[in-house]
Image: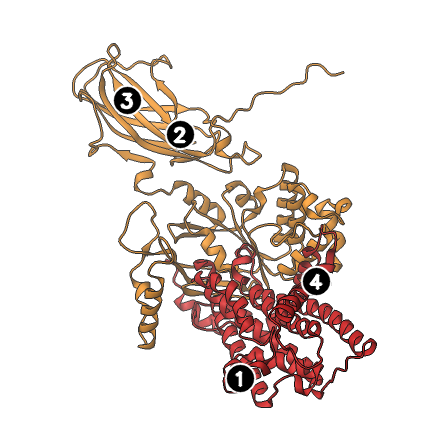
Chain colours: A orange, B red
Amino acid sequence: MSKTVLEVNNLSKQYRLGQVGTGTISHDLNRFWYKIRGKEDPYLKVSETNIRSVGSESKYVWALKDVSFDLQEGEVLGVIGKNGAGKSTLLKMLSRITSPTEGSIKLKGRMSALLEVGTGFHMELTGRENIFLNGAILGMTKKEISSKLDEIVEFSGCSRYLDTPVKRYSSGMIVRLGFAVAAHLESEILIVDEVLAVGDQEFQNKSIGKMQDISKTGRTVIFVSHNLNSIKSLCTKGLLIENGKSVFFGDIDSTISKYLSSGNAANQHMIDFENNTDRTGNGHLKFQNVSLFANDTPTNKLFTGDKLKLRIRIKSYSSVRFIVAVHLYNSSEIRLSNVTNMDSNFSFSPFKGEQEFDIEFDSMMLYTDTYKISLWVGDPATHENIDYIKHCCEFEIVEGSPIINRALPKSTGILFMQPEWTIINKK
Amino acid sequence: MFTKEEKNTDSAHNNWDLIIESKSNKSSFNIRELIKYKDLILMFVKRDFVSLYKQTILGPLWVIIQPVLTTITFTIVFGKIAQIDVGAGLPPILFYMLGITTWTYFADCITKTSETFTANQNIFGKVYFPRLTTPLSVVITNLIKLAIQFTLFLAIYFYFKLFTDITIQIAWHLTLIPVLVITMAFLGLGIGLIISSLTTKYRDLKFLITFGVQLAMYATPVVYPLKNVPENYRWLLQLNPMTNIIETFKIGFFGIENGVFSIYYLGYSIIATFVIFILGLQLFTRVEKSFMDTI
């Protein structure tokens, strides 16, 4: 019954690093020279995979390398990955904005991409004119748009302003109008970027509802978002991309848990300090390792409000008295707190040998960001360093927490608070 | 990790509606797809027309004011001051107006289509549609402008012909006007396509185009009749395809002795236009697939 409507084979995209311009002509001529002799493009070979932090000699880089997957009719695919993993590159190739360097995409039926709402809106034109213009850009014919005009206008909620130039609209109205047009596309395959992250809460719910309706009508949808929550509620399948490579393709729940537990060397849930040379202190005690748990699952990625547990192993070489402190920094190097065992009325007794202990934070009410942890053990009286490892591990608060119902840009705060609001006097 | 080698064999039986591959050296021109998007071309034309003169007092009148003011300037500078002989008994104002109207159409087609990629990168970066719709809509928008300006020219032309003593000859070449307009459109489009394709990578051409088109006007008999050029150098100007087109216009409206016409040179212009257009189309459809990476 189900048929494959989209097949992606070994899709790859190469980009050139640095300034385009210098040496462009010479590279072009060189390519041309190889081509007329029937040889392979010399610059395709030299590039490397896209790990941004690692420097490299090569001027070319694979933003996406050998990504393959296929979709059956009616499946909703969520593409997950960190910023820069290659999600947008994949979208751009799927939506035919740029062509792949290698590999192929095969599909059945019409495909439309929604990378932005209201693409091509002209500020001087009226709402009605823009509906037709935007619809035509997205591939609808005039007849199709005319037959759906009433629905589109109703969905957007802009009927009063239909004959007013769009430049007089509020930005929210423009977004609503744009989404309304896009939501009435009739293509069999729909590609949606994080357009849902715009507009007010009411409209976001409306859009998500509309997206769910669309996916229920048997159409195939590819959805890219940072918001794991909306991905979870919309998608049936998941594709996890890391550093330009597809790491996992399967059902959505496994993809999300794979994403949450994944990490590269600098960014693991368990870190061993055996060979750490960055430490300072007199060495009476030494931290051995630290593991991170979110809601008791070993991972260093968690949602706002999750329980964070640090499991620390420490080795003592002589029986000295000590206190332990955990310093918490955000990505802007602001120290958020200095947590010590004394503050929790917990005390270690002097010992020799190894000990393991847990520190549990009930709920991490923090904004989405990457946080660093430093560990300190010192003398209770003099505060002399016994062992101190700065920024020894990181954890990430990822978007999509079930307790947050709006977009939470990290520039707007650090602490997420949910106080109780009560009206005590009403006249 | 997910190799699809075994899948490839059975998918060969499937008939896909669209296959996107990396063949960067293959032109992607697809006339059927372009026809499917004809509504979009018309929407672009409408957008350009409606938006151009919004919030101006004179509105679409500007379409007429531009050539009128230029004609007056040219008549004063080239007719009165430089005293260029435009032809026996021919009102200079008609001579310049015809030249300017036709040349402006051609020049606008080039300069506007040559901006296709740079001016539309925001839209092109967000949604796919056949990119050729944009330059085509530019040519059509300008065609409407040409029609308006031509009507004005005809009004002045008939005023001179009917209400003054000046006798103006006409010739059978008038029947060629549709061919001439189409040739101009495709020539402007072709050159614009070539330049727009090359500017995505080499921005130098952007600087060349603005004054290049201005200078090209002087290599075309717009402000002077070709007859004034010594006979043994004329071929040099006639290598410019626009020369033969504008001269044919002039013969048609002003009579056989007020222009130079040769069916061979006009044929050459048409063939040259065809070659340039095909070349532009090839380049454009090749660049459109990957220009987002280089722009």
Q: Residues within 10 Å of mark 3 (few under 14, many from 20)?
A: many
Q: Which residue is mark 3?
A: A376
Name the side, left or right, on which B230 lies relative to A9: right
Give the Cα separation between the discs numbered 1 and 2. 80 Å
- Residue at the spot x=17%, y=20% of the render? A282
> Where is residue A384, by image quadrant?
top left
Crowdedness near tag 1: few (<14), some (14–19) or many (≥20) residues, C-alpha within 10 Å: few
Name the side, left or right, on which A170 lies relative to A399.
right
The quadrant in which the N terminus of chain B is found is bottom left
Distance from Cα at disc 3 to Cα at disc 1:
94 Å
Q: Amino acid at mark 4?
A: Val
**Mark 1 vs mark 4: same chain?**
yes
**Chain ID at mark 2:** A
Tell me if I can see residue B15 in this picture: no
Give the residue number, with chain letter if any, for mark 4.
B63
Name, please, the residue furthest toward the right.
B163
SS label for mark 3 = strand
Q: Is residue B117 above or below residue B252?
A: above
How many discs mark residues in the rendered view?
4
**Residue at mark 3 shares a chain with residue at mark 1:** no
Say which residue label 2 marks.
A330
Q: Position of residue A11 (x, y in %)?
A: 42, 61
Q: Which residue is mark 1?
A: B230
| Mark 1 or mark 4, earlier in chain | 4
